[in-house]
Amino acid sequence: MRSFTLRPLSCGFRQAQRMLSTTAKAAAEETVVSAPIATPAKTLTKDQLKKRELRKFLKSKAAARKPASEHPLYKTIPEALRYLRAAEVGQPSSQQTISLTTLVVGEKGVPPLFGNVSFPTPLRQSKVAVFSSDAELLKKLNEQFHLHVSGGMDLIASIKAGEVKVDFDKAFSTPELASALNSQLGRVLGPRGVLPSVKKGTVGANLESLIQENLGSMPFRERNKCISIGVAKTTFSDEEVVANIIAARAAFKGSVATQKAKKQSMLSKTTISSSHGPGMVIDFA
Amino acid sequence: MSKIVRQKNFLNAISYTTKKPQVLIDASKYSGIRLTFQTKNNGGHMGPRQLWRKYLPTLQFYNPNLQVDIIRINNTSRTETVPCILEIIDKQGKTVDSIDMKNRMYDDIMDELLTKVEHKPVPEEELVQV
């Protein structure tokens, strides 16, 4: 009974308020400075913030220790690949890359993980250039690796003149040409990241072993507390994909083992996904 | 809706909830299908695109060895027309049958594909649900 009588009353009150706010808004603003209605944001003390961060860190650490099979989206790799291949149906092959993402749980100030993975089945054939004044060596390497371009001082000159396009992904050089490359092509090759240098390990006397090591390798680096890397194409067979994932795991674990820190980072939840496909959790331990 | 529920729905749309393409196509007779249509919708090319997005993932999920080729042609001219056909390809790589998909809805195209291809529905116990 009571609520029945109250309702029209409250409605009327609201209507009156609305009337006031529309008609006499300007006047009201002049006379009354309205107080802010929203409650002020909760400010945490430094101590509380620290505690919250610690709690978050411990939670993620505990999650990293759990087996992957407890996750609701856990799939074995062949099951996951079946879904990914279905999701990628009819897409151009350049957009059918399967990628692997691993969360990294590490303490503050720990240097990020990085390294190289050399895949048993590379995602694409990389184009290689070799600079050397030794013609016989070039001939031998050309037969072995199907080099994209190769040559000595003449090649350097023609690249500088723009006659030969810089469309290779990796370049190697023998030590006697390194300084000439640096001075003449530093501006051309440097920004593209294909200038051979001793620091990168792409200058050396024994080019054969250098190219062998570097050919199918892919660099990875921890960013935003995760490592993400393309591991395969959907056209690969299940065995090839699994072999590539195992290679990636070995490289990730190697980089954790060589990390320069008191307490090393941990690898946590690992998901596999593709360009247009869903992400699924796989066992990576 | 939580992230995990949304992802489960995505997976189930491929393997469980989309009922019409849950068929096993006779693998001894056909090697694949080839769709040719325009990249843009105009001129009645919307049906094949929707067929591709809605039904082909499930069809591929239950027929992993079926080769599905999609050729999309970019056509900006108003006078020229692009073919809008679905070809069914046999083991020798020859076109056995073709369907004209122009000005048709995806459901309609799928129905015709199922009448022209020998198939049987996926048994209930083989359906995958997440």
Image: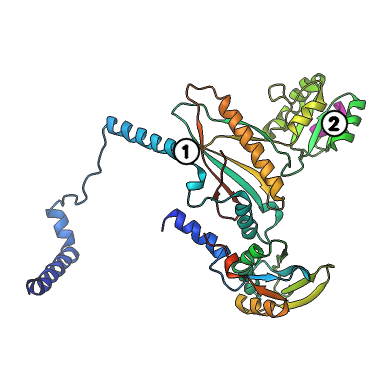
Q: Chain of mark 2?
A: A
Q: Is residue B40 left or right of residue B96?
A: left
Q: Say above or below: A257 vs A99.
A: above
Instruction: Tell me if I can see residue B101 in this picture.
Output: no
Residue B128 rendering spot, x and y as whole percentages: 57, 62
In which quadrant will I find the N terminus of chain A?
A: bottom left
The answer to if A29 sits in the magenta stretch is no
Residue hosting label 2:
A155
**Part of the protein shown in magenta:** A152-160
Q: Is residue A72 above or below residue A142?
A: below
Q: Is residue B2 left or right of residue A41?
A: right
Magenta stretch, main secondary structure, is: helix
Q: Are marks 2 and 1 on the same chain?
A: yes
Going by the numbered disc 2, the residue's amino acid type is Leu
Q: Nearer the viewer, residue A186 or B84?
A: B84
Q: Which residue is mark 1?
A: A64
- x then y, percent, for residue A257: 57, 26
Q: Is residue A276 left or right of A50 when viewed as pictured?
A: right
Q: Report the residue at 75% width, 28% height from top.
A: A185
Helix, strand, or loop for circle 1? helix
Residue A205 vs residue A171, the one in the foreground? A205
Circle nearer the N terminus (2, 1): 1
> How far apart are the two marked residues, 2 and 1, measured between alpha carbons?
52 Å
Q: Quadrant of residue B21?
A: bottom right
Q: Name the chain letter of the residue that bears numbered label 1.
A: A
Q: Quadrant of the C terminus of chain A?
A: top right
Residue sitting at x 85%, y 31%: A155
Quarter of the view holding residue A115: top right
Q: In the image, A188: left or right of A18?
A: right
Q: Is residue A87 visible?
A: yes
